[in-house]
Image: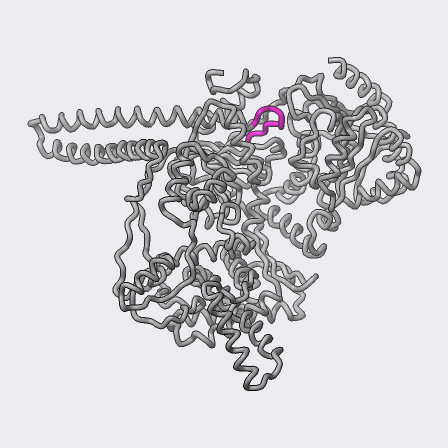
Amino acid sequence: MEEFSFPFQPYDIQNRLMREIRSCIEHGKVGIFESPTGTGKSLSVLCATLTWLENEDKQIEAELESKLKTVQLELNKSEKTTENWEAALKNKIKSEKEKEGIVEKIEERKRLTKRIDQAKQGVIDISRKRKAPARHNDFALVDDEPTDEASPSEEYHSDGENGQSIAKLMDENCEIEQEDELPKCLKIFYASRTHSQLEQLIDELGKTRFLPRVVTCSSRGNLCVNEEVKKLKLNHLINEKCMELRKNGTSEKDKKQKTEEGAKKIRSCAKSCEFHNSSQIEDLVNGILANKLKTALQLTKEGISSKGCPYFASRKAVPQCQLVLLPYQVLLHEGTRNAWGIDLKDNVIVLDEAHNVLSTINSIYSSEVSEKSLTLALKLIREYNAKYKLLLKAKNLLYMKQLEQLTSKMLIFLNSESKEDVMTMAQLSRNLNILELNLFKLATYIEKTDLCKKFHGFYLQSKRNEIITKKENDKPKLTGIQKLMVKKEENQKQKADESEDVQPQITVSSPLFSLKSFIDALTNKCEDGRIIIDKTNGSKFRYILLNPADRLAEVVKACRATILIGGTMEPSQLLVETLSRGSIGQDSISRFSCAHVIDDSQLLAVTINKTTDGKPFKLTFETRKSHETLKALCRSLQVLTQHLPNGIVIFVPSYEILSDIIRKAKETGIMEQIERKKTVFAESRHSTPNMLADYSTAARTPKGAILFAVMGGKMSEGINFSDELGRAVIVIGLPYPNKTGVELRERMRVSLQVIVQSWVFYFQFLDSQMPNGGNMLYESMCMHSVNQSIGRAIRHRKDYAAVYLFDERFSQESTRCKLSAWIGDRTQTNLGFSEIIQKSNLFFKANSTK
């Protein structure tokens, strides 16, 4: 207990897990850890990593003091020596340089300590911000007409020309804020799939003695408290609107005052964000660093009441926080990581639920653009070029013409009769005849010039003009007197609404956002992705990333150590091979599978090879429609479930198979017999939360209940079927992604043809990268779903459940070895149906009397 300050008496497996995690960090390795739900995984990870963090921080401080003393002795020695003065001088210079570096690190630690003390005292120090001097044209005489926000940026310099980056240029009436470099500390980056899981982690942290400075990274969409911005809904629109309001640095009050005091007028601009206030943001940062605002919910509530921006407070607090919680997307996407200022060097990464990492990376770096978006984008690009061509430099006009050319050729190809529907980047370039285009420079131009934002403004202008034109056309023809009366009414209304923006607000996405995302995707390594032409439900280009190895490696290599942990990490061979392809050596990868905290008497795990009639059972694509197979399965379930108490969760490979089983059970009258003993529920694609609540209520009754669910569906991951809710889990068949695409179509609501092509190319790609890589992916997709489904039961130390693996393939060692270790090692095979019933009765009788 003292070793890791675990809040309770730790089990032996918890001590082993914490020691393995600490060893992994100390040796700078990549650790793949499997710890079943109910074994205190989150607490173990927190205690292991934060204990290491404490010890490492103390060790660094001691080493700095020791090194400073040693260097000072060397300096004293070099000053006193009288022999070989030249060598002594060199040693002195070397020692002074070394001392300077050590003193700098010590001073940084002192600055950090001072900053934390200020936060605890509530001191708001904005002296570290310096405002850049106003330029000579800041208050130039201009008309009162609003600026054209869609106009191109004149300051962009391409191809390495001298000039200031457009990313650093602000509006002419804005003040640029510059900050001194903030002190940093050693930290743990803890990433998970969802924000709710991160919130749960903070609850677990509260059970320990540790009080690290905690911050949660989230998107503007989650943290923004400006209602005018939040109502835009779409994340990229929220981001662009936020940047626009921040650039309007001078408040309306200040501008009015300056106009009245000076004879000169300034350019008018849109209202700035009231929450982007340095003092209030600094106050929120203090709350984070003083451990008063730990969760995103607490931060946003405080932001609303104090008129400070939670998003920028979170970003500003990251360097000084010791535990940084963030969703996968922030950590695994390079652009988002850089925007948050995430510095991985010498720090530790924990990736929770890490069986999702590879699929998440593939999803993050994939993209699509539709024919509809391309058509609208081409129209806008042409109109934009025609309107602003005289304001663009020759080089920048060239980029705009290239963007127009690329969009036009993509649209032509999408509407062509070409039968080539899956391509590499090289093949796409040849088919579009864009070999001369440099997509990297084009993507950089779009990014650096805020072109998406400008096109969004241009898009809104065109939509407003259409609305105004339509209104004008719909107006009835008036006489001269009627026109005068209407004009008078309009003037009165204008005065009454002088401070309001009466323009129609349109919160729709500009088509350039999806086009830019697709161009960015095309800048990945040529061999790492494929472009798919999908001509169902509207034609579109889809880019799929096939090789997440490089993207994962750039994260893993940047940090000190990486902990990949989950309740069901097996089979993990594909993850190991992916890391190896990212140049992570096998000797740098550590693997550890944790046993369960329960005793053997609390788990009954058996394979069911045969149905009640003694015939072998194997649910495949060929047999799943068989009348005899389905009838024998339903009869076996009816016989088995009447011996099982409370709640029973039955997992099947797909919604289509589930529908077939339910239909067959009703046709044969077996369902009626089952319902006499148990209340039956069945998951669907549109299941409501009420169904789970109703099942939970019924499962706790003496009669009990059965819930039919789908592996890989809503009920198979993240749902807690503890105690009476999951006294038994029955897994029917193996959910292999069918190569004809049926199961994939069930899981992913897109074209069957496109999915088949996507996965076939994915399998082929992996086969080309590693021996048997396609089959490795095939097995992983299947067995991860099986392991996740089994993991819904037995959620704590005193829980107990029976697991039935209903398919003869589960008896094979090649399949059983891919189960999580805690279940695979305890699974009994080759038992007759009557013997399984007998063992079940004894198991539940023994556990119910404890």
Please name whichever residue, 116 or 11, is drawn nearer the observer in this view of the structure: 116
Is 550 situated above or below 117? Answer: below
Q: Position of residue 359 (x, y in %)?
A: 59, 44
Whole-percent x, y for residue 632 in the image = 88, 35
| Residue 354 visible to the viewer | yes
Magenta region includes residue 35: yes
Question: At x 18% / y 27%, what residue is drawn?
Answer: 72
Quarter holding residue 358: top right
**Boundaries of the magenta span:** 33-41
Outermost residue toward the bottom?
480
Viewer-closest of 63 and 680: 680
Question: Image check: 698 left or right of 167?
Answer: right
User: Can you say whether 240 is above or below 265 in the image?
Assistant: above
Quadrant including the C terminus = top right
Q: Main secondary structure of the magenta part?
A: loop
Can residue 554 be seen here? The reply is no
Q: Residue furthest top?
A: 850
Residue 201 located left or right of residue 499: right
> Horizontal placement of 166 versus 531: left or right?
left
* Res 17 quadrant in image: top right
Query: Which residue sits at x=54%, y=28%?
Result: 204
**Closer to the camera, 792 or 741?**
792
Q: Dividing the picture into quarters, in which one does residue 100 lie? A: top left
Task: Give the residue at x 46% y 16%.
Answer: 2
Residue ID at (86%, 39%): 630
